[in-house]
Image (cartoon, helix red, strand yellow):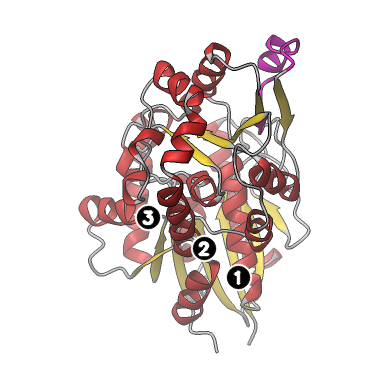
Amino acid sequence: MDSSVYIISPFCSDPSSSWFSPGRARKLSQVSQLLLSLRIRVCGLNTAPTKAITGDYPITRLCSTSFLPLRIIQIIFSAATLRARHLNSSSVVYLWLYNTRFTEAIVVYILLAIRVRINKIILEFEDLPNARQENAGIRGFLDFYSTKWLVSKASFACSVSSNVTNALNKNYNCSSLPIINFPPLLDGDFLAKIHHRSTPFSNNIVKILYAGGYTHDKGVDILIKAFLQADSSMLQLQLYGPAPQNLISRFSSTSNIVFFGVVPTTQLYDAYASADIIVNPHRIILNSEFVFPFKLAEILSSGALPLSTPVPGIESYPLPVQCIFNSTEDLRIAINKAKAIWNSNVQELQALHSYARERHSIHLVRNELRKRLKLS
């Protein structure tokens, strides 16, 4: 009997869309690759009003509008017709939810209501409800109760970090729900690139890398301000991700600030492997124990000097205290002293890189998933 996993999530492959999230796109890619490697058929059910393109599996869009009341109506109708259009009653059907938002819970509720035979419901926890300011309020209220309901229906869950697992148990009474660890995973191509990387600060130009989103909470403005105030002229700031056009235009005449935009992962891996410093300037998160930033795994594994604000989960890594900053001025000083910080902590940093690479190995999660899904 064939096995099919339906991943329920907002999918978006357009970097210019407000629905696009680099971290979510990367993690969904990892989820699908893991499932496909287990020889499971994968399909996507898109709860975002955006088109998404992937060469690996089909994605069905369930709505076409961002207006929440109408979006919910469209999702209900689309979910109710899924059985006739897509779901094969002779298959083993798994539902995989990327986070447990209200809109994703609606799809599960409708499929259960129309008596689709679902073998397992799997919850993937990346950001818990009310983790961020933009997800709080009424949205957070709806997401909280949809999560409580989904926990009661799920076969098992995947959690991005031990902090998130602890918060789940504390807020959602998950004592009877098996939870496996599913942190951000390191791609084999990424590991191959950084294995052959050059030693940081071995060239005249010091490359400082940022890769990620550009919303206010990401703190890119903190990084740019600190960079412009740094003393050395032998610095280059490389910015990857969906930067807004007004930010690009503002610094178009600054030759040592380069915007690369959203690039293929192979090009991004090359950037990680050639960077001397990688900065994570994230602002304080509303409920920090509810999240674990995807890019933290790559930053700490990269072989470069990591400089970061005290983001969730970073406390569980042996990071030298000089690599943590709390303000623009702290970051400016760290950039100025970056080579000295590297030289005085090189053994500790190399041990950190090895530890992070082991901790985020794809093999650990694949074996656990195979067991939970009862695959031979």
Element marked by disc 1? helix
The residues tagged by marks 1 and 3 sit, at their Cα atoms, a distance apart of 20 Å
Segment tinted magenta in the rendering: 239-255
Q: Are marks 1 and 2 in contact (CB under 8 Å)?
A: yes
The residues tagged by marks 1 and 2 sit, at their Cα atoms, a distance apart of 11 Å
Residue 42 in the image, given as x and y percentages of width and height: 65, 67
Name the residue rendered at 62%, 80% in the picture.
91
For label 2, the residue is 96
For label 3, the residue is 161
Element marked by disc 3? loop
342 up-or-down from 109: above or below: above
Return the mark for residue 35.
1
Disc 1 residue type?
Leu
The residues tagged by marks 3 and 2 sit, at their Cα atoms, a distance apart of 18 Å
Which of the 4 quarters of the picture holds residue 329? Answer: top left
Residue 43 in the image, given as x and y percentages of width and height: 66, 63
Which of the 4 quarters of the picture holds residue 89? Answer: bottom right
10 Å neighbourhood of mark 3: few (<14), some, or many (≥20)? many
Q: Earlier in the sequence, mark 1 or mark 3?
A: 1
Q: Is residue 318 visible?
A: yes
Return the mark for residue 132.
none
Q: Nearer the viewer, residue 288 or 145?
A: 288
Q: Is residue 10 visible?
A: no
